[in-house]
Amino acid sequence: MLIPVILSGGSGTRLWPMSRELYPKQFLPLDGTHTTLFQSTLGRLKGLRDLAPPIVVANAEHRFLAAEQLLEAEVEAATIFLEPEGRNTAPALAVAALAAIERDRESLVLALPADHAIRDVGQFRSAVETGIDAAGAGHLVVFGVTPTAPETGYGYIRAEAGGKRKWRPVAEFVEKPDARRAQQFVESGNYYWNSGMFLMRADRYLEELELHAPDVASAVRESHAHVCRDCDFMRLEPGAFSRSPSISIDYAVMEHTRRAVVVPLDAGWSDVGSWSSLAEIGSADKAGNVAIGDTLLEDTENTYIRAQSRLIATLGIKNQIVVETPDAVLIADRGRSQDVKRLVNRLAEEGRTEGLMHRRMHRPWGWYEGMVSGERFQVKHICVKPGASLSLQKHHHRAEHWTIVCGTAEVTRGEEQFLLSEDQSTYIPIGTKHRLHNPGTIPLELVEVQTGSYLGEDDIVRYDDNYGRSD
């Protein structure tokens, strides 16, 4: 049995302003299509032999994003483990390995970061099939990307020379090199980029983890033993999990084990680690520009332009990154795209929310988007999915006015319950219990005007909720 393990705990700070802490890059459609990186990772698994439902390890804050995108991708019977805090990939894979063994003692786990892009899916599947044979023979497999350039932003794997099999023993893992050493690596033919993708028997990984990182194994076993089901999610026990060191699979196991082998992968792989790397896998025009959205380019070369909500026009620029969202615009030298995280750190230091969330906030019932705000008032555009409901709640400091734009609303207001259709409205006084439900088959859209002395999202008292958020 082959169990995919989708590692989805990353934050993707280098892809700000699209990627935010509460809506990171793995859940975004970044290649110009409507498919997210998370969903593409799931999609390229189809056709593999003995494939079982996936295990997803995600940040607790992203649980509804993961669940919704699994549903959209028509992936059934997935198990979603929620990390109380990020502790890197070694503990995450240990959680999945313990769950995999409960399904099948001899199961193989295929660890895949949720935020990578691969152009040639056929080559990827062929490499995984080779990895299945290697893992079945007792090896711990790392997929090594055949380098196409002397990249200094990736770690490298040196493989032992020779051998008749399609996999080669790992001689050593090498940290990110300088340009001179990277050129030597590429020319030697024995080095591969470390993709961060792994395949091995679940029990073999746990054995090696016990041997080389026993503090990780101990903390994860205790946390997993006290896992708590929360609706469709499995919450790991936070106290034990927090005691695990924050460490990657590479450092915890792969650099120490004698069982590591590398399977070459030549499939147009990218870790989508920066805007520059995203530009490299995009479809460029004759001037080397990659343009997505409503753009107008004049005398522009080798530039990545992405417009989300308005026209972006460029004139006389070269080697730039221009990314626009409704609440932030990034303009950067293409050679500095790895430094975008410095801007995100400054936003956090200054207490700004643009690094944390988007103007449009997604919820399990739909989404809302801030339109206008001022002293003692704000206006939101709200969309509720068919059949979905907000929690039964009240607010201590604000009143709300709802005007229906599209669809039908079932409103609970105090002891009343009534329907509203397009162009109808209602008023929710301060302190009144209320609920909004969409009984229809199309999305319900409304404009909400809030007024009051305090309009923060934490002014909510929940009495009942379909998504496990009740107070």
Image: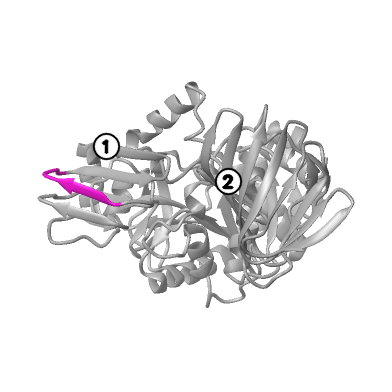
* The one of 385 and 123 positioned closer to us in this rendering: 385
Q: Give the amino acid at mark 2.
A: Lys
Q: Which residue is mark 2?
A: 380
Magenta part of the chain:
311-318
Q: Is residue 315 magenta?
A: yes
Residue 432, image x and y in percent?
82, 41
Horizontal arrangement in the rendering, residue 151 relative to residue 47 (left or right): left
Asked whether residue 409 is in view, the answer is: yes
Q: Amino acid at mark 1?
A: Ala
Mark 2 Cα shell of 10 Å, populated few (<14), some (14-19), many (≥20): some
* 11 lies left or right of 147: right
Image quadrant assignment for residue 400: top right
Q: Give residue 3's position: percent from left, percent from top.
A: 63, 65
Q: Quadrant of the C terminus?
A: top right
Of the pair 235 and 36, the residue shown nearer to us: 36
Q: How is the image coloured?
A: one colour
Please name whichever residue, 352 or 338, is drawn nearer the observer in this view of the structure: 352
Q: Which residue is mark 1?
A: 332
Q: Earlier in the sequence, mark 1 or mark 2?
A: 1
Q: Could you tell me how far apart the alpha carbons at marks 1 and 2 are, in whole angstroms?
A: 31 Å
**Residue lying furthest front:** 424
Q: Dot 2 lies on which element?
A: strand
Quadrant where the N terminus sits is bottom right
Residue 247's disc number: none
Which residue is located at x 20 percent, y 55 percent? 296
Which residue is at the far right? 415
**Helix, strand or loop under label 1:** strand
Residue ID at (20%, 44%): 183
Residue 275, image x, y percentages: 33, 46
x 42%, y 40%: residue:
327
